[in-house]
Image (cartoon, rainbow, N blue to C red):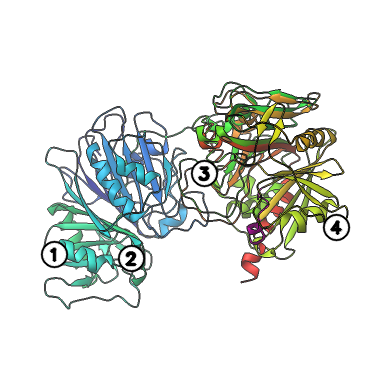
């Protein structure tokens, strides 16, 4: 490839890739290079310029060896301040079982510092590319044919493309493009605003960035249009017959009813410059006009089902490109359908760095709890070794040394000694994800230390942003939140993973090495989305924290098909006491005093945490204490009747000091409600556990308890690997899950017994390996964050508890 080339089409093994390079990129090689055929790890490329008349062989596509696909994506797979981008894919990387009707895959990128430097990539490869985490071509996709197209465009074309994408409703899994009022459709696209007035289809024309310009037309249709995109949209708009290469069902056939408007299906197999491909293994969908010079890549196959789904086609009017695909179409006969994905180059990608510590809120190894009251930008913290009183934190809005930021320091920024999973039902920067889970947290570990791990559980949506810095969501300052960090032994990770499988959290980041995952069966099933379980319908798992004395932690999980109400049917029964509950309540479930010593008492709003007031109107944490006893529990579902049909999980701590603090809160019934606060109140294990401590500003990565607990989740560290789960994961829109669990289960793969478990209530938080970002909207709410340091041997028990929550989904229909 040459930097001055304007366009290219690539064929990689059996993947067909069409790429365009755009000379306006000086920092990035914004070019497209390959087309790949099934069972081949090299491609065939058409590259704009003097070499556009012939297919070129590419190097091996599975390696980061400067070939066309890597070069086009170099600033998507690695961070660069001169490139910001949106990546979308109906099968996003590392996020199992996402449901979406869209089939679109691509990258839209721009240079925010240069007025007219942008690119658009369209492709067909599921789970690709991984944003900011290096080049990984999915091994399973080598067996299939794929298409990759890259267009260098003018920045002014971005909003036109966004308008077309809004109709197609793609699943966006990464977005860091700055807001700009000049791009209203882009803003609506990333915010998930797909509701449109008629027409039900849309056409947008753009051109590439060189002087001559390559004419590109985008056709989109919404799922409500009921149009079959090939006949009702493309044939009508192109005003010609078409030859189509794509799979076809048993309903739609070649169609020659209208003179000059035929649909001819290219027969399988085909040959792309000597490389054979067949419909059995080629997942590209494309067509050419007949006659004419138009080549189109479509994101849906020629199936009847797409009449009820969104669909999009990108059509290029170019005689050279058309000529190459016209030859391919003539090789086989009357059936012609081929779909191309078009890669774009980005100028930005996150990098991984070493993580050399494993912390929960502070530098101690035990546990920390931070409670951020509504309208407060500071928190109250209980910190191990100083748990006698709540401590004030600094403002959580800045990463300035408070426990929240410190816990997350290696989650928000890469560190080779920390690998982690982040989960959140409201993931950062991904709007309108649907999931029944409400869990939020980070599970991290040091892969180089055998027993170096942490688990963070919290309540903050859209937080943290993995590997992208500390950003506490401003809107969340007005809310009450809870953040708990457990420093655990690596042996506890699989136990935590077992419990999480029941809660079915939405994992939006996972970089724990396969070797660590494969050695933990429940962790492996959790990250792969395997929730099928046999009875019982509820599960109990006990773990201990890593301190010598050990903190006893019990996890209770239930599956969505159990029909159990978790407070009455699980927790009261298991704890064998009455309970005092702080959570919102619906109009159905009430205080319940029917059974002696098994009462459910609802704590009256408002409450006070170490001088910070909170009310049910703005506090989204759910917790309870036993009455009598020393047990404190954080629950991922509120006291609503609806949770009887949903998975749920509770993490219960048996500790007199922690219980005492929350027992006092439960008795405070006359506090006045203050404005939103961005600090929290923390209980930290150890000598300071007798009082709440103020945290620093939770919205900033300023070494507070939450940041410290998550430091090797938000930034990479080789000594910490983790699972993060959340029913609202960061940057993943429209995820559907019944789980409400949020947390992180982490471990040190190089240390036999170093692990942690974090349970929290914050949606969209934390963002794995991309820095600390506390969701702004969650500052307005009350949240709970608990971090436990556990033994590594406990991990599988925790994971088993999570798995049980999903049990009857698969056993009882």
> Considering only order in the chain, which callout, 3 or 4, is on the residue closer to the N terminus?
3
User: Which quadrant holds the N terminus?
Assistant: top left
Q: Which residue is mark 3?
A: 427
| Residue 787 visible in image | yes
As measured in the structure, the alpha-carbon distance from the residue carrying label 1 to the one carrying label 3 is 43 Å
Between discs 2 and 4, the one toward the N terminus: 2
Rendering coords of residue 672 (x, y %)? 66, 31
The magenta span reads: 636-647
Vertical comparison of 673 with 272: above or below = above
Crowd rating for badge 1 (residues with CA inside 10 Å; few <14, some 14–19, many 20+): some
2 vs 1, front mark: 1
- Marks 2 and 3 sit apart, C-alpha to C-alpha, by 30 Å
- Kindly check if marks 4 and 3 are in contact, taking CB atoms under 8 A apart as contact: no
Disc 2 and disc 4 in contact, CB within 8 angstroms: no
Q: From the image, state whether disc 4 or disc 3 is nearer to you.
A: 4
In magenta stretch: residue 646:
yes
The residue identified by callout 2 is: 301
Q: Classify residue 566 as left or right of residue 414.
A: right
**Residue at 39% from the left image edge and 44% from the top image edge:** 190
Judge whether residue 415 is colored magenta: no
The Cα–Cα distance between marks 1 and 4, rounded to whole angstroms, is: 75 Å
Number of residues whose C-alpha sits closer than 10 Å to that of mark 4, classed few (under 14), some (14–19) or many (20 or more): few
Please state which of residues 385 and 27 is positioned toward the viewer in this rendering: 385
Query: Which residue is under mark 4?
Result: 595
Q: Residue at x 44, y 58 (%)?
A: 100
């Amino acid at each position: 490839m040459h930097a001055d080339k304007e366009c290219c089409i690539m064929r990689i093994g059996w993947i067909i890739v069409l790429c365009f390079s755009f000379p306006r990129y000086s920092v990035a090689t914004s070019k497209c290079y390959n087309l790949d055929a099934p069972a081949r790890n090299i491609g065939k490329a058409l590259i704009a310029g003097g070499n556009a008349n012939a297919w070129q062989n590419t190097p091996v596509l599975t390696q980061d060896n400067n070939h066309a696909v890597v070069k086009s994506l170099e600033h998507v797979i690695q961070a660069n301040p001169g490139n910001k981008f949106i990546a979308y894919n109906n099968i996003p990387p590392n996020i199992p079982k996402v449901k979406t009707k869209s089939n679109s895959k691509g990258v839209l990128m721009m240079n925010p510092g240069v007025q007219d430097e942008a690119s658009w990539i369209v492709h067909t490869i599921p789970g690709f590319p991984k944003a900011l985490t290096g080049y990984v071509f999915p091994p399973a996709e080598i067996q299939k044919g794929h298409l990759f197209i890259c267009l260098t465009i003018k920045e002014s074309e971005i909003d036109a493309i966004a308008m077309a994408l809004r109709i197609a409703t793609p699943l966006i899994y990464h977005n860091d493009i700055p807001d700009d009022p000049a791009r209203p459709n882009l803003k609506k696209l990333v915010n998930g605003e797909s509701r449109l007035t008629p027409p039900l289809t849309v056409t947008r024309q753009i051109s590439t960035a060189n002087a001559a310009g390559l004419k590109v037309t985008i056709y989109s249709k919404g799922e409500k249009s009921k149009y079959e995109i090939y006949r009702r949209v493309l044939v009508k708009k192109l005003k010609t017959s078409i030859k189509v290469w794509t799979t076809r069902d048993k309903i739609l056939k070649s169609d020659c009813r209208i003179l000059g408007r035929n649909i001819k299906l290219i027969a399988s197999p085909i040959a792309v410059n000597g490389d054979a491909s067949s419909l059995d293994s080629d997942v590209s969908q494309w067509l050419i006009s007949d006659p004419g010079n138009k080549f189109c890549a479509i994101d849906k196959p020629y199936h009847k089902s797409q009449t009820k789904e969104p669909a999009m086609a990108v059509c290029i009017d170019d005689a050279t490109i058309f000529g190459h695909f016209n030859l391919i179409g003539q090789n086989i006969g009357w059936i012609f359908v081929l779909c191309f994905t078009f890669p774009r180059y980005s100028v930005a990608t996150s990098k991984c760095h070493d993580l050399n510590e494993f912390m929960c809120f502070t530098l101690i190894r035990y546990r920390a709890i931070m409670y951020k009251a509504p309208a407060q930008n500071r928190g109250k913290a209980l910190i191990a070794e100083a748990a006698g009183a709540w401590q004030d934190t600094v403002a959580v809005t800045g990463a300035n040394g408070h426990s929240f930021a410190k816990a997350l320091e290696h989650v928000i920024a890469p560190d080779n000694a920390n690998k982690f999973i982040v989960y959140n039902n409201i993931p950062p920067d991904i709007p309108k994800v649907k999931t029944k889970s409400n869990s939020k947290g980070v599970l991290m570990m040091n892969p180089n230390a055998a027993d170096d791990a942490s688990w963070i559980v919290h309540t903050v949506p859209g937080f943290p942003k993995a590997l992208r810095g500390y950003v506490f969501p401003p809107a969340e300052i007005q809310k009450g939140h809870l953040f708990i960090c457990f420093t655990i032994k690596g042996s506890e990770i699989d136990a935590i993973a077992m419990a999480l499988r029941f809660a079915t959290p939405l994992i939006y980041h996972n970089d724990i090495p396969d070797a660590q995952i494969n050695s933990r069966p429940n962790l492996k099933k959790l990250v792969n989305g395997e929730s099928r379980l046999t009875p019982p319908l509820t599960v109990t798992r006990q773990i201990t924290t890593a301190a010598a004395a050990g903190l006893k932690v019990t996890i209770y999980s239930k599956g969505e098909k159990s029909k159990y109400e978790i407070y009455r049917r699980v927790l009261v029964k298991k704890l064998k006491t009455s309970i005092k509950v702080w959570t919102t309540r619906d109009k159905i479930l009430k205080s319940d005093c029917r059974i002696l010593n098994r009462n459910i008492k609802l704590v009256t709003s408002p409450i006070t945490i170490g001088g910070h007031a909170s009310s049910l109107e703005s506090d989204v944490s759910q917790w309870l204490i036993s009455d009598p006893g020393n047990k404190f529990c954080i629950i991922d579902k509120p006291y609503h009747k609806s949770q009887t049909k949903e998975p749920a999980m509770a993490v219960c701590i048996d500790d007199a000091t922690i219980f005492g603090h929350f027992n006092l809160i439960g008795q405070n019934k006359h506090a006045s409600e203050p404005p939103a606060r961005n600090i929290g109140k923390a209980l930290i294990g150890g000598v300071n556990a007798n009082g709440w401590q103020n945290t620093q500003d939770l919205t900033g990565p300023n070494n507070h308890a939450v940041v410290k607990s998550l430091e090797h989740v938000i930034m990479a560290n080789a000594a910490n690997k983790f699972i993060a789960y959340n029913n609202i994961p960061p940057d993943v829109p429209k995820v559907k899950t019944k789980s409400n669990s949020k947390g992180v289960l982490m471990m040190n793969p190089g240390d036999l017994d170093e692990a942690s478990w974090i349970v929290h209530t914050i949606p969209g938080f934390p963002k794995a390996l991309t820095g600390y970002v506390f969701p702004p909207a969650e500052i307005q709410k009350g949240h709970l964050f608990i971090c436990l340091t556990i033994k590594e041997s406990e991990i599988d028990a925790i994971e088993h508890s999570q798995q049980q929550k999903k049990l009857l989904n698969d056993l009882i229909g």
